[in-house]
Amino acid sequence: MLLSSLLLIPFVGSLVVLLWPGGPSPQRLRLVTILILVAQLLVSLGAIALFDPTAPGMQLQELHAWVPGIGLDYALGIDGLSLPLVLINAALTLVSAVITRDIDKRPRIYFAMLLLISGAVNGAFLAENLLLFFLFYELELIPLWLLISVWGGANRAYAATKFLIFTAVSGMLILGAFLGLSLLTGTVDFSLTPVLSDRLTIGGQLLLLIPLLIGFGIKIPLVPLHNWLPDAHTQASTPLSVLLAGVLLKLGTYGLLRFGLQLFPEAWARIAPALAIWAAFSVLYGSLAAIGQTDMKRMVAFSSVGHMGYVLLAAAAGTPVALLGAVFQMVSHGLISALLFLLVGIVYRKTGTRDLQVLHGLLNPEKGLPLTGSLMIVAVMASAGLPGMAGFISEFLVFRGSIGVFPLATLLSMVGSGLTAVYFLLLVNRAFFGRLAITPPSGDAQVDGRLDVRLSPVALRETLPAIALAAGVVLLGLWPASLGHLSEAATTAMGLTIGGVA
């Protein structure tokens, strides 16, 4: 029942928030949501105590027949691939609730949708039935659309509609592949069987794998399927950007590994060279696009496009080391991107702008945002892959495991990693160094009347979530075994699976 509780806590909590009697204040609803998410995090941590890191297969399994006529079973399980993602979901959803403030418009719906998304993500990571995964994968769609369209920025309707269309297409392709699997195998069994090579021809495997690649590629997102992400991030509130980048994008990378590589290893090995090229292109495009941004939030959004390409590169290589690096990359990117978006949100709240042509000198120790600026420097160093940070460990493992298989694609991705340092140094240099100022983009001297600006200080309670995330980034960088021992057995088994058919 432990895995079921990871669904019941957020789902029941969502109903509690919606049906809370009377007219509770937004502050009370926020407190109730935080307590529910703390309970979810504690149960997630409890799964570690019951988890055997030396066993590569699914553990703590729960199986109940649900709708046997269509092959839909309530089947849950957890392994070294899904456990870290369940933990990161619990942690970052809690962070999103903690940093949510000043929600006066429909607070019941806001916090209920936040809990509903968290439960749906848990269900997707834990599902051992293909149809059950699809139900949870789709369940987070409408709540996320609502959170963007109701609590987003000025162009929220456009961004939310684009997100809805792209994600709906993603779901259709994934469902089509799952139904095609039933058609080609002549069965209504949708249980998660690790290898289907012996039941399908290579042509049949490719026919099913390609729509999965496109569907999950939209979710990740990979270039050129990424178009919805920058707009969604720009218009989303800071808590939602933390959740979107830190957790929801990982549904795509998880799906590629779980349902692409594991189900169709023979077909995966056939198209792996093309996947490696796709990964390198996505990394370079995301990095170059980030360099051209002047909006801090759009820059961080494009950085996600590039950094998610590392996961595809590792999956294409399929070696145990690369796949372990893919898990590290998903977790480290979750922490780092959440930290970056949180800090950008603080800057926007204190200055009223995210424009790098307007902001200068925010690191000023007396009148600026010195702690926010210091944490931003930590975040960009981690994202650029400096040693001692989580980003270094993940990128090193990905490149080390991939370079022997796809040297050119790996080298191009390394160039993308170097470009990360370029655009984030541009961000830090423009916004945080120099004389404190908030000036018009024109820079005309006659209108530059805000040079002697003094920003209101950031309260410690606003900064604590960022400090916690920064501590997690450093801890994972200095103690990678804390994650590696949970996932190594599972990723090694996955690598051996694809290695056996390559």
Image: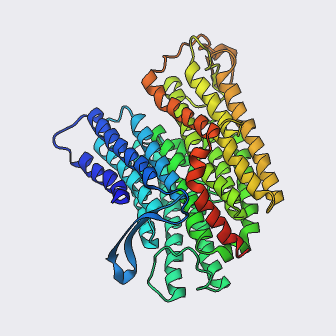
Could you tell me residue 49's position as x and y percent? 44, 50
* Residue 131 picture quarter: bottom left
Could you tell me residue 499's position as x and y percent? 71, 70
Residue at 83% over, 58% down = 407
* Depicted 227 relative to depicted 69: above or below: above
Residue at 64% over, 37% down = 478
Residue 242 or residue 405, whichever sits in front: 405
Q: How is the image coloured?
A: rainbow
* Depicted 380 relative to depicted 115: above or below: above
* Depicted 319 relative to depicted 411: above or below: below
Name the quarter where the N terminus is drawn.
Answer: bottom left
Horizontal side of residue 251 vs 276, given as left or right: left
Name the quarter where the C terminus is drawn.
Answer: bottom right
Residue at 26% over, 52% down = 15
| Total marks in image | 0
Residue at 75% over, 36% down = 422
Could you tell me residue 18's position as x and y percent? 25, 48
Examine the rendering and report whether any part of residue 285 can be seen.
Answer: no
Residue 388 or residue 386, whichever sits in front: 388
Could you tell me residue 209's position as x and y percent? 61, 74
Q: Residue furthest bottom?
A: 186
Residue 366 or residue 289, whichever sits in front: 366
